Image (spheres, rainbow, N blue to C red):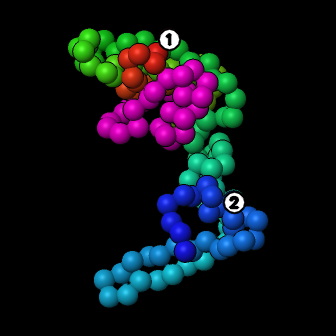
Amino acid sequence: MTHGDQRAAYERAVAGESRLFAVWPGQWSSDLFEIDDLDEFAKALGIKHDEERTGLKDHIHKVEWIKDPYGNDNPRSQYLDIDVTLTCGCSINDRRAFAAQMKEQQGWVIATSGGWSKSGRPGGPTTYSLRARRKSLT
């Protein structure tokens, strides 16, 4: 029995070498469930891309960003508050998925903890307020 490495567990289950289970803890007893939909498991954990869940297409994003005029402007801070607009038509529903794609595509390090927000008007562009490692932005 192993735990922790979700990708390896998924690959073993797909190969038929093992099965996946989930435990729902209770106060006096716990319930054990077998995970039978491996595709949904992979999408939920980001092993497989899920456009519906993340709002992000699997392509190179067209991204415009500016420094947030109201954000922390301390030059010693490792992170910078930025406003991001995706001009490719995607939306950010899952910050971790967006951070992983930006790390791969642009080399950006987007903070995945702490707050973030989005703003916009119907029919107009949506702006996302995020934090990025200052040195990773180009």
Disc 2 marks a residue whose amino acid type is Glu
Query: Disc 1 on helix, strand or loop?
Result: loop
In x, y percent, where is residue 113? Answer: 35, 39
Please report the bounds of the magenta region as a residue range. 94-123
Using residue 4 as the reference point, say whether residue 105 is left or right of it.
right
- State the residue lying farthest toward the front: 1
Report, in whole angstroms, how far the alpha carbon at label 2 lies from the one at label 1: 36 Å
Report the disc number at residue 11.
2
Q: Does the magenta stretch include residue 112?
A: yes
* Residue 69 in view in this figure: yes
Relative height, residue 62 to residue 16 (above, below): above
- Please report the residue visible at 67 percent of the width from the left and 24 percent of the height from the top: 60
Disc 1 marks a residue whose amino acid type is Thr
Query: Which residue does the numbered mark 1 point to in the structure image?
Result: 138
Q: Residues within 10 Å of mark 1 (few under 14, many from 20)?
A: few
In x, y percent, where is residue 62? Answer: 62, 18
Relative height, residue 50 to residue 80 (above, below): below
- Please report the residue visible at 49 percent of the width from the left and 40 percent of the height from the top: 96
Using residue 60 as the reference point, say whether residue 63 is left or right of it.
left
Report the disc number at residue 122.
none
